[in-house]
């Protein structure tokens, strides 16, 4: 039980002060911020007007024109300094993540660690924005491609990764020579203000060291969907990286396509794992438990469907139920707690609705009760397991809460087919010690997701790989590997260092 609920408001203002946020930005505003931990209002953030959002975007475009010509390794120095600020303030920012969105302490800190990791990655990348040299068919010619800065990058982020997703985009965009404008979720503006304040500190140190950084290089705009729309509709925004529900992607994607802007869409997931007859069940149990219950089921990569082979079903499922019954639910900042609150009542209503639908379809539910931790306005639940006879109804869609649907299978090809038979295509896993099954799962005939893991769960990706999913997950990729290319424009250059002008394809055009 949390007894001193009012303590958070004080904690929040002391954390925000340490992180460099001006109290004027989060007191007396129109956007009430509720901590899911207690259900109390902890701040009233000032929202950005449409006019001010437009001004910020115009300023970011002006800044881009200067930033794009600064050598990439010098741009990388700014990101390096930002990484230093994050390292120095990891504890405070991590705690604010826990208070604002209810992540357990290690996950709140882990989110800031992801920001640090992507800064390190981007600093290295700032010396590796490589293009190709390509064989040309013409003599005394050289052909190559170069990667150039793109423009203003608009970042729209979701509540459940309130700061890491911005950092994934911001760090890459900045070294790629772009300016950035960020609209965080209206459910998590405080961590947005704090992260941006740390970035501004890094910017000040950068300028103090004698580097040039144009005014307006990075902006934060606060508000709900309407402010996001200003970003989406502004013709000077070259790329929108939008993370959120598939419904949001359906609204944003066509608008961007209509004005030929680029998009990175990182949308909903309905992730699955297959447990084969040869699976190491101890390892599987841990992998499934973390993926399905971690972050109270509020990760885009949360495990939502589990296909268990007939031969291991009656061994694994009772063990899983035991783990579900014993997992500690409560104040996410308390030692030993693994499952914190749902973000709000809407999430709780969605959880109940899905469980009722599953029951009506013959599903057998274990867990799923509301747990009292801190009064009526916070929403804690015991994660639910639902044994389903058929792959149908609520199993086919993402409910952003801790529900794990479990189904039996007897042929791995059927399990893979069921896994792929949903709209989303983000993350997937197989637990097996059979190399044929593992390879089949990762092959062209296997998982159709952007992430296909073997012997680990569906969640908890590292920043080194490209992150994203297919189908209704939107097709975007961000973070590691060559995801940086989406933040740059590619030019193909052909250079003639001879004295004749041979035409490609042998075309003759003598004048
Ligand atoms: P949401 O779709 O409600 O909101 C996400 C963001 O989009 C918010 O900032 C919101 O204000 C903004 N937004 C909504 N409609 C908009 C519009 N028409 N124009 C411009 N901006 C708009 O999502 P949420 O509830 O904050 O987050 C949960 C969802 O996000 C889940 O579906 C989850 O799977 C998904 N998610 C996906 C990834 C990924 O990488 N694929 C990562 C995190 C979360």
Image: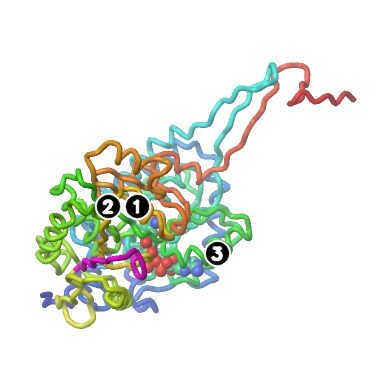
Which residue is drawn at the image coordinates 34% and 61% (left, top)? 162
Q: Secondary structure at mark 1?
A: helix
Q: Which residue is mark 2?
A: 410
Please tell me whether residue 436 is drawn above or below residue 306 in the rendered image. above
> As drawn, is 83 to the left or to the right of 145?
left
Span highlighted in magenta in the image? 383-395
Q: Is there any visible trace of residue 201 in the rendered image?
A: no
Residue 250 x/y as whole percent: 51, 65
Q: Which residue is mark 1?
A: 414
Q: Which residue is mark 3?
A: 55
Marks 1 and 3, the one that precedes in the sequence: 3
Picture quadrant of ligand 1: bottom left
Q: Secondary structure at mark 2?
A: loop
Other residues around mark 1 within 10 Å, as few (<14) / some (14–19) / many (≥20): few
Name the foreground residue: 215 vs 258. 258
Q: CA distance from mark 1 to mark 3?
A: 54 Å
CB under 8 Å between callouts 1 and 3?
no
Name the foreground residue: 1 vs 274. 274
Residue 99 x/y as whole percent: 23, 67
> As drawn, is 61 to the left or to the right of 417?
right
């Amino acid at each position: 039980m949390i007894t001193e609920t009012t303590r958070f408001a004080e904690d929040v203002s002391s954390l925000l002060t340490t992180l460099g946020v001006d109290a004027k930005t989060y007191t007396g505003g129109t956007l009430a911020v509720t901590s899911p931990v207690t259900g109390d209002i902890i701040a009233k953030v000032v929202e950005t007007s449409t006019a001010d959002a437009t001004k910020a975007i115009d300023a970011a475009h002006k800044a881009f024109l200067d930033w794009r010509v600064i050598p990439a390794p010098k741009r990388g120095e700014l990101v390096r300094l930002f990484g230093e600020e994050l390292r120095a303030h990891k504890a405070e920012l991590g705690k604010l993540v826990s208070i604002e969105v209810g992540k357990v302490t290690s996950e709140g800190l882990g989110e800031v660690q992801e920001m640090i990791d992507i800064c390190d990655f981007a600093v290295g990348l700032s010396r590796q924005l490589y293009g190709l040299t390509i064989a040309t068919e013409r003599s005394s010619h050289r052909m190559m491609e170069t990667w150039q800065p793109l423009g203003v990058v608009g970042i729209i982020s979701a509540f459940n990764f309130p700061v890491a997703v911005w950092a994934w985009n911001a760090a890459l965009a900045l070294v790629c020579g772009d300016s950035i404008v960020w609209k965080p979720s209206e459910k998590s503006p405080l961590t947005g203000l704090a992260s941006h304040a740390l970035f501004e500190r890094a910017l000040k140190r950068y300028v103090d060291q004698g580097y040039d950084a144009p005014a307006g290089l990075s902006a934060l705009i606060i508000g709900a969907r309407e402010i996001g729309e200003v970003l989406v509709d502004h013709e000077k925004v070259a790329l929108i990286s939008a993370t959120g529900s598939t419904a949001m992607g359906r609204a944003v994607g066509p608008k961007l396509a209509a004005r030929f802007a680029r998009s990175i869409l990182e949308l909903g997931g309905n992730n699955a794992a297959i447990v084969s007859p040869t699976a190491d069940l101890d390892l599987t149990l841990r992998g499934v438990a973390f993926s399905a219950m971690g972050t109270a089921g509020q990760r885009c990569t949360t495990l939502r469907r589990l296909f268990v082979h007939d031969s291991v079903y009656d061994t694994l499922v009772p063990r899983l139920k035991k783990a579900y019954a014993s997992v500690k639910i409560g104040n996410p900042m308390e030692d030993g707690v693994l499952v914190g609150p749902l973000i709000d009542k809407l999430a709780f209503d969605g959880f109940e609705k899905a469980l009722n639908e599953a029951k009506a379809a013959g599903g057998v539910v274990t867990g799923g009760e509301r747990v009292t931790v801190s009064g009526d306005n916070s929403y804690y639940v015991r994660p639910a397991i639902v044994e389903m006879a058929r792959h149908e109804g609520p199993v086919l869609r993402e409910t952003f809460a801790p529900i794990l649907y479990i189904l039996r299978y007897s042929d791995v090809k059927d399990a893979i087919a069921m896994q792929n038979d949903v709209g989303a295509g983000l993350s997937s896993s197989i637990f097996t010690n059979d190399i044929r099954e593992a390879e089949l799962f990762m092959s062209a005939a296997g998982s159709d997701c952007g992430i296909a893991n073997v012997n680990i769960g569906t969640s908890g990706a590292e920043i080194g790989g490209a992150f994203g999913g297919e189908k209704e997950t939107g097709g975007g990729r961000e973070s590691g590997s060559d995801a940086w290319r989406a933040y740059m424009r590619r030019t193909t250059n052909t250079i003639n260092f001879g004295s004749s002008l041979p035409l490609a394809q042998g075309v003759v055009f003598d004048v």
